[in-house]
Image (tube, coloured by chain):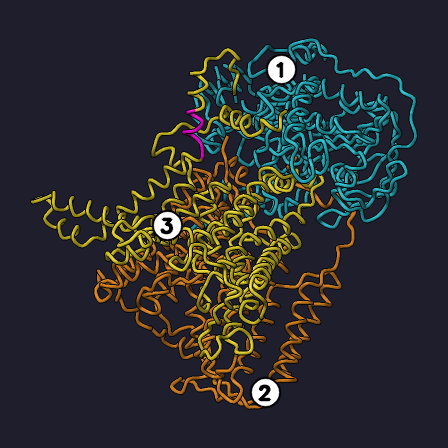
Chain colours: A yellow, B orange, C cyan
Amino acid sequence: MTTTPKAANADARWSIAAKEIVSGGAFRAFLSVLLGFVVGALFMVGSNEEFLKALSYFTARPTDALAAGWGAIADGYAALFRGSIYNYNADNLVAALRPITETLRFAAPLIAAGLGVALAFRVGLFNIGASGQILFGALAATAVSTRVELPWGIHLVVAAVTAIIASAAYGALVGFLKARTGAHEVIVTIMLNYIAAGLLTFAFRQESLLRETGGGGTPKSDAPAETAQLPLLLGDSYMLHAGIVLALVAVVIYWWLMERSTIGYRFRMVGHNADAARTAGINVELTFVAAMAVSGAFVGLAAINQALGARAGLTPDIDGSIGFDAITVALLGSSTAPGVLLAGLLFGAFKAGAPSMQVIGLSPEVTGVVQGFIVLFIAAPPLIRAIFRLPAPQKTTVVADWWARLTRKKAAK
Amino acid sequence: MSTVAASTQFQSAEAPRTFKSTIVMGVFALVVFVAFGVFGKPEDVTFQWSKPDDVIHIPDFVVGSSLVGLAIGAILILIAAIVAVNASRRRRNPQWISLIFGFFAIIALLAWLAAGNAVPFAFILGNAIVLAVPIALGAMGGIMSERVGVVNIAIEGQLLTGAFLAAVVGSLTDSLLLGLVAAMVGAALLSMVLAAFAIKYLVDQIIVGVVLNVLVLGITNFLYSQWLANDGERSNFPGTFDITPIPLLSDIPIIGPALFENRLTTYLAFIIIPVLWFFLFKTKLGLRARAVGEHPLAADTVGINVARTRFWWVTLGGVVAGLGGAALTIGSVGAFGRGMSGGQGFIALAVVILGRWHPFYAAAAALLFGFSIILRVWANQVSPGIPTDFITMVPYLVTLIAVVGFVGRVRAPAADGQPYIKG
Amino acid sequence: MKLELRGITKRFGTLVANDNINLVVKPGEIHSLLGENGAGKSTLMNVLYGLYAADGGEILLDDVVQNFKGPGDAMAAGIGMVHQHFMLIPVFTVAENVVLGNEPTSALGVLNLDEARKRVREISDRFGFDIDPDALVEDLPVGSQQRVEIIKALARNAKVLVLDEPTAVLTPQETDELMGIMRDLAKAGTSIVFITHKLREVQAVADRITVIRLGAVVGEAKPTDSAGSLATLMVGREVDLNVHKNKVSLGSSGLRVSGLTVVGDRHTKVVDDVSFDVRGGEILAIAGVQGNGQTELAEALVGLRTPSAGSIHLGELDITHSSVREVIDAGVGYIPEDRKKDGLVGDFTVAENFMLNKSYAPPFAKGISIDFANRDRLSDELISDFDVRTPGRETLAKQLSGGNQQKVVVARELSRDLNLLIASQPTRGVDVGSIEFIHEQIVATRDAGKPVVIISTELDEVTALADRIAVMYRGRIIGIVDGKESREKLGKMMAGVAV
């Protein structure tokens, strides 16, 4: 505890602060990401044919193997960079900048769904149901975007709001079932994921419902009407659409809700100690329902992204792996607004980089490995501390105090 | 503070009547009676109890589809009524009532689907069992882990690990048995990671489980696309265990072929389920394991090593789940496919709860899912117009209803999911 | 068996829980370990029992140095322990609990439950316990559960029996019976370590007394020493636990409870037709042994449980079916018995904990956003007014000591405009200094003309604070008597004898 007298010199405070930062979550997240890339590199090397060939005569000419190994890593991550940030091999600037816009496009639903999962986390709920909530929201959005005719602008808003309401309702159902019956939300959400998938497939298969006009037996819908599509942000040369704007707005709303508002305060209270919250007059059951509804609403933004950001007909796998990636995004981002934003961008980059890795003959699935190891390291703080010999979490609040002084200066007046 | 509440101390009050089961069963019964009976299909349905080459042949049973719906609907309504009477007298309904209910409901569904066609009973039952094996073994692994107080969400990852290693090691070594061993060892190692994180580092067990699933999915996807997809001939072509009929037993009519004409993996499941039950409830080790899952501190104070007990039960649970994974490849289709566990590990998780942490009930619940998978396939063949997406949803819906409807009466091990922190 | 502890030291981080403790217990002796809450008694016994590894010192049994790696070793060496919180598995039978860890088996590790039942019956008969080996522990009353614990220790041939605060859950009569059992055991050669902070019990049963304070032995005492000198030794200064109350003229009816019935989780009437009223300027104490429905009564009063019959009025206001929030808004302050579970959010800062039940309105909220400036200012005020020892308002509540955590709860509740204060076990697990402070605050609330209900299992606390005492037994109020009623009569009432 800080028994430091006021006269303590600034050096000591700086070193305490440094210790706090090094032992803190953000620094650990950074190291986890680093370590994840290292492990990913090992997988690239291990599966590289040249390296394996060179390994067979390793004792004779070790440099060959090392060069091949290094080459595999460099090629792999260079391809990832070209695919997700800046393509320095491109013919023109428009093409060179396309990767970063792709990263943003892929990151948008991850950020939105990640916020949803993160919010539930902080209320002590494990929302594995993002996938189902996306499907349900997308189902509703598609019904509006393909079966309703409305003028430009209004059509999009109506479709988007429908999606958010549908996703939020599907999330609230989880909260309701948990609050009413005590059923564990993990099981409930898993089951609801399958049920949503079944409903959506059914709707996409029935001609009378949402099946593609003139389509066959495979479940597929029409493309969203042009009036209901999320507008492109950077003209026709890029596929980036307004989804990322929604995601960024969501980040700000999430931050304010969880850190500054009394609603978020009560959400967190229930998450930390539901008994104490109940004793303090909080309706814990209602909070579960409300929190899952808000969580679902954030996830609904991801549904909008998938359903209204598309330019072609949808298939039952429109959620991709977003539902589950959202969990890892929330974990990596430690359920804070800036954390989720950064984690979403990182995983968005992984998705964006896939095609260019494919081109050089490297399975883009390697990013799945990197992703898996990152969250493994994130999940086990003691492991990372042991690997990097970091100090244990500090009980001092030097950084927090500085931060409080910075952010609340205005309020304190 | 934590003294155990003693009910004998107080005047007893009337327990409230709960009609949840009655309502759920009543709705199902009416659906069967009305949809399959009153508005059912008039065509005949043929129940084929035996295959043509069976030693003891039981003649086919031909009956009108809607008649079956009416008859079974009536039986189900009767069962619901019995349940209602029990509930109004505040008597507990035994678990087997829902099993019987489920059995009849499935027969009615079969008769409806196969109107104007035949129900190959042995075929369906046999396939349901084979398909239920990975789920059941995954659930057994889950039970072993949760009974000592460690929630295992990583069953999915363990199935996938088992499936992958069984196929790859089985191919490369050309020995299915080695593949089987590799599957068990691999999944056990995964369990050890879960156990170490949960027990030593006190990381939230659900988070570790989810993370391990992500990790295994990432690794197997990568290895599959980078390696197996190009080198399938050598690395992903293990074949399957032979189907070995057990003499005499496989000649029993109806159930004989379904139960006793199977592969090694299925037989192992038949052995593991009762053995696990016996160990959990009849032996010293089982008593200790349950004590650790209920009240770890109390177990510690009588000299039981909580961490070690948890570690080994979770690890052995991994062995069993790995076996379930092997059943997906070398016990069934004979090759590994990308993400081939396809959520069966999550189903197993539900089966653990549905089966009330009890090996036999969990096995029955797993069979329900086995049925649903084979029904979907078979229903597409016999009556193509049926919206199979709904049949797909039924078991999930049943699980959901069961979990939310009856969970109040089911008690999980008291310390399930809670780390044991020693002073 | 002779037990000797030499120089036992145990640290938790920077806190020294046991500092170089020496203790000798002779064979067949009842040796009392006396100390206030947090003095380190339980830590010492957990070291002895192998649950904690000591940082220094050694344990000797019959002059042989022992090296316990876990409770298993300690038990094998002949040490048995009856823990303050019972170490029984509720869903197991008595027999299963008794043999757990030491199971009789036939071939292949198959349990032999017949043998287990036999063991239970043998010991049960020898000491005149009436325990059915096949009963589920969760169905047994607390007193019987304690006997199961004793059987458990004796079934392992314990030669040294440690009893950790064993009377906390017993009626005075049951306490007497337990003391009889202790004497019988001692006569039969068992050495007994009796841990307690209750002077009366020490004087009644101990052969010798060792007093510890702040983790260190501060002296030995004889059971014939006066209670005053024992208390002084235990606390380290003169203590005056007599609370000074001013004469207050009683106000109008504050809280009126009539015919209140609450059905518990297991369909029993845990509160059974309870009626009483409390007027402004009066403290009504609900006395009784733990687990007789007091907790549920308190929870019903604040809206945490729904009564199945009866009514609760606060002044003219009917709050029988009000939600917790409505009750709070009606001006009811509530100090729950388990602060860690119900009173605080350990992972919240002290400041955040001050606004736990005040997040809906000013001064802590401004619309739906938190008013940080006001919150910080008020938090600092409360910290100094209620003498909360904390590095600052941004410190997490879980990092404070038990006494300071309780002060946070008390500060939060008393800083509101109250019409009623309900305090459940307000000083449980709290050091003497904080006890005095909290008692003063409670009395000050009464003196300000507010009605106060305290619920306590500590007879000393009840008699010190109460103007009137209601005794609860099996969910019913056995009687309501004057605050100066004799302990003997209160003891009888706590055992269910209406007087």
* Mark 3 neighbour density, 10 Å: few (under 14) some (14–19) many (20 or more): many
Q: A361 or B409, which lies in front?
A: A361
Question: For this view, does C400 lie left or right of residue C258?
Answer: left
Q: Residue at x 64, y 26 (%)?
A: C376
Instruction: Give the CA distance from mark 3 to mark 2.
Output: 59 Å
Marks 1/3 same chain: no
Report the residue marked by disc 3: A100
Marks 3/2 same chain: no
Instruction: Give the CA distance from mark 1 to mark 2.
Output: 89 Å
Residue B176 shown in magenta: no
Q: What range is drawn magenta here?
A: A18-25
Nearest to viewer (mark 1 / mark 3): 3
In the rendered structure, are the residues bearing label 1 and label 2 in contact, judged by CB atoms less than 8 Å apart?
A: no
Whether B275 is drawn above or below B302: the answer is below
What amino acid is at disc 1? Arg
Pick out the residue farthest to the left. A60
What amino acid is at disc 2? Lys
Q: What subunit carries mark 2?
A: B
Question: For this view, does B77 lie left or right of residue A153?
Answer: right
Report the residue marked by disc 1: C208
**Tag on residue C377?**
none
Q: Residue at x 31, y 58 (%)?
A: A355
Report the residue marked by disc 2: B41
**Residue C104 at what x, y percent from top left?**
49, 45
